[in-house]
Amino acid sequence: MKRTHFLLPAIAGFAASVALGANPAWSAVKSASDIACELAGDCADAQPEAAADTPADTADVMAEDEPPTRGWTFGSKPKAKDKPAEPVVNRPAQRVVAAPRPRPVEFTTIDVQFPLGSSAISGDAVEQMDELYNALRRPGLTGRKYRIVGHTVAVGSPALNKELSMRRAKAVLDFLASKGLDSSQFVIDGMGDARPLSGVTSYDPANRRVEIARID
């Protein structure tokens, strides 16, 4: 009996943790600020790609060709360590310009968490869609072109999941259009269950999501 009393709470706790992870009601809502900086590509933690100043005392900046010799020189050439020390001269820092990199497509993953097999936007998904709408109305993002991509879990046939993912992308477009955004700003696509999130199984509820990419 003592072992039974010990195991039952543990089993109940495990079941509760599984249910919590599978229930979309606990999904965090991404803020409009986070969405906006991801779509703009200017989040604070982004690595700078601007050219960097190279210190003047680095080897490649200080390296100089030896002056040409005059007349004939007999014997071995003096070693570098035998040369008299040169006075230190303050040279301006040289600016090394990095080669331009192609601009990556800015995108954000929106954890809409549609109900299983559904494209309905309800519950916490409405709050998340409001945050997306507010982000798209910010300076620098208004009037841009975007691609909305729907995703599903790997439950059902690939053909049905493809169609469901398209309906989910369309549901997001319809929501944004109902709030006043121009539907011509958006194109939609559906990936079905072909691209699960990294680090989770293809059956994880987190894969019931949409992605928004800036394409202009």
Image (cartoon, rainbow, N blue to C red):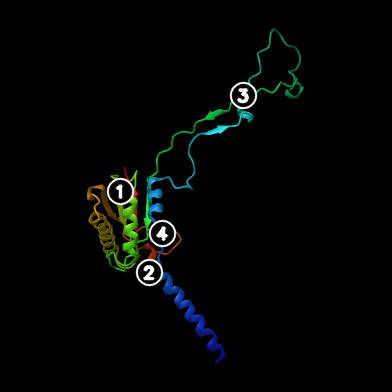
Residue bearing mark 1:
146
Could you tell me if the residues under marks 3 and 4 are in contact, i.e. CB atoms within 8 Å? no
Cα separation, mark 3 vs mark 1, equals 48 Å
Specify which label sits upstream in the sequence, 3 or 4: 3
Circle count: 4
Specify which label sits upstream in the sequence, 4 or 2: 2
Residue drawn at x 33%, y 53% as measured from the top left: 134
* Mark sitting on residue 25: 2
Cα separation, mark 2 vs mark 3, equals 62 Å
Query: Which is closer to the viewer, label 4 or label 2?
Result: 2
Please state, as top left, top right, bottom left or bottom right, where the N terminus lies in the image.
Answer: bottom right
Query: Which is closer to the viewer, label 3 or label 4?
Result: 3
Quadrant of residue 22 within the rendered picture: bottom left
Please state, as top left, top right, bottom left or bottom right, where the C terminus lies in the image.
Answer: top left
Residue bearing mark 3:
91
Specify which label sits upstream in the sequence, 3 or 1: 3
Q: How crowded is mark 3: few (under 14 residues within 10 Å), some or many (20 or more)?
A: few
Residue bearing mark 4:
197
Quadrant of residue 121 within the rendered picture: bottom left
Q: Residues within 10 Å of mark 4 (few under 14, many from 20)?
A: some
Specify which label sits upstream in the sequence, 2 or 3: 2
Specify which label sits upstream in the sequence, 4 or 1: 1
Q: Position of residue 36 (x, y in %)?
A: 38, 50
Could you tell me if the residues under marks 2 and 1 are in contact, i.e. CB atoms within 8 Å? no
Question: Can the viewer see residue 203?
Answer: no
Q: In this view, does 161 lie above or below 101?
A: below
Could you tell me if the residues under marks 4 and 1 are in contact, i.e. CB atoms within 8 Å? no
174 left or right of 107 in image = left
Cα separation, mark 4 vs mark 1, equals 21 Å
Q: Which amino acid does label 2 sit on?
A: Ala
Residue drawn at x 24%, y 53% as measured from the top left: 180
Q: What element carries label 1?
A: strand
